Amino acid sequence: MQLPSVSSKVVSALRWLLLPWWLAQVLTGEKSFWPNPILGDPGLNRRGFAVWRGRLAARMTARRRRQLESLVPAADRAAFERDGYVVKRGLLAPGAFSALTAEVAGLTAMAGEFKEGDAITRRIPLTPALLARLPACRRLLGHPAFHGLTRYVGSFDAEPLVFIQTIFTRTGGDQTDPQTSMHIDTFHPTMKAWLFLEDVGEEDGPFTYVPGSHRRTPRREAWERRLSVRASDPRTRKTGGAFRIAKPEMTRLRSAKPKRFAVPANTLVVADTYGFHARRPSARPSMRLEIWAYSRGNPFAPWARLDLSPARLWRGQAAAIGFGVMALRRRLGLPAQGFRQVARVSPGAPPAPWP
Ligand SMILES: [Fe+2]
């Protein structure tokens, strides 16, 4: 977005010409403070605009979740309300779980790989074409707990994006994995889910979550307001809205002790990643193999069963399209956020060295 050859005043004038676009963006999931001059207005955010936006999105999400209550037993809803996540140990029957792990082990498919610090994440999107030849994966997506929890927590009655995901930690180099810092994914409630296909040890970089941190509290909103003002500083041009939080601030917010999900294989975790979460640093090079899902509709939509976002039209192909676009950006020499596409790879194969 930066145009180094044009003065910043001209850029700023051009930004205001797009005012109708920026206004429409206010009621979407757009989380960047730049280049939208409304979302990134320091004066507005000092007066609590970003907090108001988050509060409204949370209210609409609660409304949509109420519409989907019948998908999830009351006990799971209560656990989610309390903690911000639901854990299901031994999700699949032993036979179904071994069929799933065998299917994943025997698969070779197109994948996207992302490098963040010294970690590499490989994602194989479960597109309709791939699912057609993976019966055990199809059965998992239809499993009542997986089906119900991903929709209820995601607050939309829509298929989440699902991937076979492998995370390789400590792959070399001295850069820190940014996912090991406690953070929120965005300003509104949003769902991510993991079905771990192998045991996750304490040393293997387990997922970590601060119980109850999905709830908005006056202290949490004050923190968000401070960070939204800081992120609106025109000099920083902050494009992300995934705020990070350090330990002393978490103490000020009276946050609970983080819970580590060092759990046995066949455990499902479905979480609202508006809550504070991270990947715990690995003590050694490790590999985590899982089925990973996420869902992110327009947080301001009033109906869980009527998704008006244009993304619904290509939902099944979204990941493959996204990977294609990033691969093209890379070929054109544009920033592609540490991404590469791999034509054929098996989920558990060690990643090639990153150039
Ligand atoms: Fe995250």
Image (tube, rainbow, N blue to C red):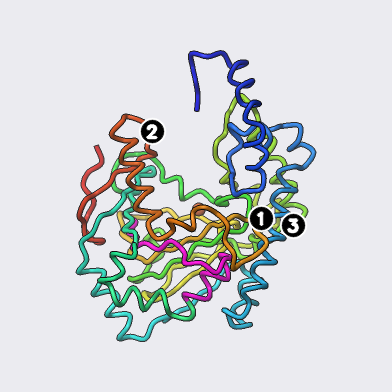
For residue 226, what is the image quadrant? top right
Asked whether the beta carbons under mark 3 and mark 2 sit within 8 Å of each other, the answer is: no
Report the number of numbered marks.
Answer: 3
Q: Does the magenta stretch include residue 66?
A: no
Q: Which amino acid does label 2 sit on?
A: Pro
Looking at the rendered structure, the kind of residue marked 1 is Phe
Q: Residue at x 59, y 64 (%)?
A: 306
State how far apart marks 2 and 1 are (Cα): 30 Å
Q: How crowded is mark 2: few (under 14 residues within 10 Å), some or many (20 or more)?
A: few
**Residue 347 spot, x, y in % from top left:** 26, 61
Crowd tier of the residue under label 3, counting other residues whose Cα lies within 10 Å: few below 14, some 14–19, many 20 or above? few
- Residue at mark 3 to residue at mark 1: CA–CA distance: 20 Å
Report which residue position mark 1 lands on.
Answer: 300
**Residue sitting nearer the eye, 246 or 195:** 195
Q: How far across and how far down the image is residue 253, in percent? A: 70, 53
Q: Nearer the viewer, mark 3 or mark 2?
A: 2
- Residue at image position (24%, 49%) is 342
Tell me the kind of residue under disc 3. Thr
Q: Earlier in the sequence, mark 2 or mark 1?
A: 1
Magenta segment, which residues? 146-168
Q: Which of marks 2 and 1 is in front?
A: 1
Q: In this view, does 222 lie to the left or right of 210?
A: right
Residue position marked by numbered label 2 in the rendering: 335
Q: In this view, does 26 lie to the left or right of 262?
A: right
Q: Do the residues labelled 3 and 1 touch (CB within 8 Å)?
A: no
The quadrant in which residue 330 appears is top left
Residue topped by disc 3: 217
Residue displayed at 34% across by 65% down: 128
